[in-house]
Amino acid sequence: MPVPPPSPLPHLPLGELEGVDEATWLDVIQKMDEVYSKLVSDEVELEEKNAQLEQSQQFIFSLLSAMSDVLIACNEDGLIEETNAALCALVGRSEESLRATPVLDLLADEQSVQRWRLAMYHSASREGTVVEINLRGADGQVVAVDLNCTPRHNSAGRQVGRVLVGRPLGELKRAYHQLREAHEALKLAQQQLLHSEKMASLGRLVAGVAHELNNPISFVLGNVHVLQRYGTRLSRYLEAVHQLELLPDLLALRDELRIDRLLQDLPSLMEGTLEGAQRTTDIVSGLKRFSTAVHEDVTQVEINAVVERAIHWVKKGTAPRFEIRWSRGDDCFVNGNAGQLLQVMMNLIQNAYDASNQGEDRTPQLQISLQRDEANVHVRFADNGPGIAPEHLSRIFDPFFTTKSVGKGTGLGLSISYGIVEQHAGRLSAENLPQGGAQFSLTLPLAAC
């Protein structure tokens, strides 16, 4: 507050001022002005310091309010002198009610009391110590808190209390869990990157091998077809010769060389050779499809028709006794290649037959269902087989991975199907059913009307 100016000197009679000269009065007036100026300066400085003190107090208060960690400042007797909003929220009490309260009143069990006393003892002789104690939360539940206990000193360097700062262990555990999940995701991404690089190298190798195999397979197929024609001619010739009266020596040689048996076996041998060569051709075609991206014409394809065509061809070919339950749904059109989608459907149906046909006392069955929503069509293939081993679920779509015996599968069918579905902006997944068996789910986006 401003200091009032000095009161003017009272008017005194000249007789009372005798003995005091004018110079003396001038010195008195000058000293009074100096004192007044000093008082004004001190008042201004005091106001500035008060403003700085208020700013410092506001800054400290904002820091305490913003802290997510709990804070307790106590004296040497363990009585709370200062705290923050985080602790108030944790224990469900106001800051005023916590002041002068013993820290021991906040502890939830005797073990925490012992740890607290031990921490107080150690912090008196050390720079600080860490203690894990249980506080009684606002809802009555026990809250584990990791507190860092450090000594507090006054301006003279004398220890006057303790400062405890900590965070509930639940938050630390959640942070650790998130860090661990991020680490696992990073490891998985690294593994996938390494796997992708391996698959790219393998694709280049497979493309070269498939190209090299095509030539000898073509020779085998061409030569077998020629041998079939030659065999037919030789059979006709020998049959004509055998109609003649042969010499006894020729008849004996005919029996010794088993010419009749040879003529009977020759067609089946040719057919087996053709079947093996054709199977090799199919494997090479699968390898080429795996190693290269094949771009084919895209049109609107009706999924019900594709499913029915796939059922027809699989039952006509390798699975005549396969019981397939399928009912046609509403027309569902998708943008894609009909041939590729047919390949996917046939592969899923054939795999379901192979899985459910493993037991002699079980009739292989497959339930195919189709559902649609506003954006997608969902086709599910549920078989009655033994299901997929849990350790194989994550690898079922990997190239060259197969659980079939040698000669029964190449491990490319599901991998190629997965790639085709991805090219059609869809999803292909596999799972085990609670009642047994496996289910493959195919999701494709519907074509815009």
Image (cartoon, rainbow, N blue to C red):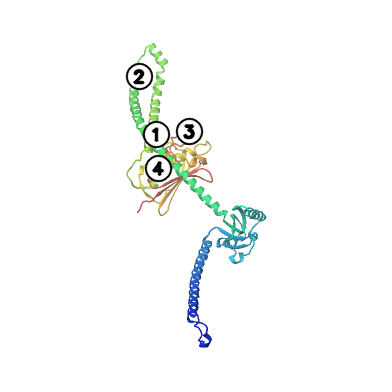
Residue sitting farthest toward the front: 19
Q: CA distance from mark 3 to mark 2?
A: 42 Å
N-term-proximal mark, 1 vs 4: 1
- Tag 3 and tag 1, C-beta contact below 8 Å: no
Which is more foreground, mark 1 or mark 4? Answer: 4
- Tag 4 and tag 2, C-beta contact below 8 Å: no
Q: Which residue is mark 3?
A: 405
Q: CA distance from mark 4 to mark 3?
A: 24 Å
Which is more foreground, mark 3 or mark 2? Answer: 3
Q: Amino acid at mark 3?
A: Ser
In this rendering, does residue 82 appear at all? Answer: yes
N-term-proximal mark, 3 vs 1: 1
Q: Which residue is mark 4?
A: 419
Could you say whether the residue bearing mark 1 is in a helix, strand or loop? helix
Residue drawn where x is 59% and y is 57% of the image: 164
Looking at the rendered structure, which numbered label has been put on residue 238? 2
Figure check: 22 above or below 391: below
Would residue 17 appear left or right of 304 to someone viewing this image? right
Q: Amino acid at mark 4?
A: Gly
Q: Which residue is mark 1?
A: 283
Q: Quadrant of the C terminus?
A: bottom left
In this rendering, does residue 310 appear at all? Answer: no
Rendered location of residue 58, percent (x, y): 51, 65
Q: Amino acid at mark 2?
A: Leu
Could you say whether the residue bearing mark 4 is in a helix, strand or loop? helix
Along the viewing direction, whichever of 124 and 247 lies nearer the viewer:
124
Numbered marks: total? 4
Could you say whether the residue bearing mark 3 is in a helix, strand or loop? loop
